[in-house]
């Protein structure tokens, strides 16, 4: 966990796991309060990211939230559209996206991962509106739009609040992501 001092108040948030040459960059909407407190992405035991990720075979071993930073060695990084933690995504304000989406765009352009995967249409739409200045109605999957040289893919949000998609559905989406990423 890190303290962001770029704004009027200090906030406890998650560090980015970024480096040049990434094959895949996962972008969440924002850190959950719990994840920020424990210092790992998708750390809530009820979040389905890690079980779905493991089923997809994106890497050749089983990993947990505590392993998030080690995935840099596998060419996989993590960040968020907005870095302010909230108990639920609905706690975010437009000001959070106005502040953070342009920062995310700068990070993506700087590090140029081969593929950027947004967790959920809400995250991608927030990025588009506040990072690119466009309003679109994207669908899940590979997008026509790119960010610099990076292709963009959108998967369902693995949050337990997104009950529309089962663990099997999520694992299937991460499997599609693996195919697109060449994994």
Image (spheres, rainbow, N blue to C red):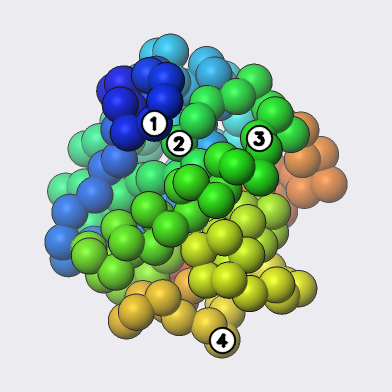
Depth check, mark 4 against mark 3: the one in front is: 3
Q: Which mark is residue 7?
A: 1
Q: Which mark is residue 144?
A: 4
Q: Marks 3 and 2, how far apart in space? A: 10 Å
Contact check, label 4 and label 3, Cβ < 8 Å: no
Q: Marks 3 and 1, how far apart in space? A: 15 Å
Dot placed on the residue nearer the N-terminal end, 4 or 3: 3
Q: Residue at x 45, y 80 (%)?
A: 146
Can residue 4 be spotted in the picture?
Answer: yes
Q: Residue at x 29, y 69 (%)?
A: 109
Secondary structure beneath disc 2? Answer: loop
Q: Marks 1 and 2, how far apart in space? A: 11 Å
| Dot 2 alpha-carbon crowd within 10 angstroms: few under 14, some 14 to 19, many 20 or more | many
Q: Marks 4 and 3, how far apart in space? A: 27 Å
Q: Which mark is residue 83?
A: 2
| Dot 1 alpha-carbon crowd within 10 angstroms: few under 14, some 14 to 19, many 20 or more | few
Q: Residue at x 31, y 50 (%)?
A: 77
Depth check, mark 4 against mark 1: the one in front is: 1
Dot placed on the residue nearer the N-terminal end, 3 or 2: 2
Dot placed on the residue nearer the N-terminal end, 1 or 2: 1
| Dot 3 alpha-carbon crowd within 10 angstroms: few under 14, some 14 to 19, many 20 or more | some
Q: Marks 4 and 2, how far apart in space? A: 26 Å
Dot placed on the residue nearer the N-terminal end, 3 or 1: 1
User: In front: 128, or 172?
Assistant: 128
The N terminus lies in quadrant:
top left
């Amino acid at each position: 966990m890190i303290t962001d001092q770029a704004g009027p108040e200090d906030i406890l948030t998650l560090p980015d796991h970024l480096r040049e040459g990434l094959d895949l960059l996962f972008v969440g909407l924002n850190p959950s309060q719990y994840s920020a407190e424990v210092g790992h992405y998708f750390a809530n035991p009820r979040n389905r990211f890690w079980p779905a990720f493991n089923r997809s075979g994106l890497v050749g071993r089983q990993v947990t939230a505590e392993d998030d930073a080690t995935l840099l060695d596998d060419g996989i990084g993590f960040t968020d559209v907005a870095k302010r933690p909230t108990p639920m995504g609905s706690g975010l304000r437009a000001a959070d996206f106005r502040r953070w989406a342009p920062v995310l765009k700068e990070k993506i352009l700087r590090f140029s991962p081969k593929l950027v995967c947004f967790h959920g249409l809400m995250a991608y739409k927030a990025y588009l509106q506040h990072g690119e200045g466009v309003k679109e109605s994207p669908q899940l999957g590979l997008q026509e739009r790119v960010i610099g040289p990076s292709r963009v893919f959108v998967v369902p949000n693995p949050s337990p609040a997104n009950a529309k998609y089962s663990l099997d559905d999520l694992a299937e989406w991460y499997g599609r992501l693996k195919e697109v990423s060449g994994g």
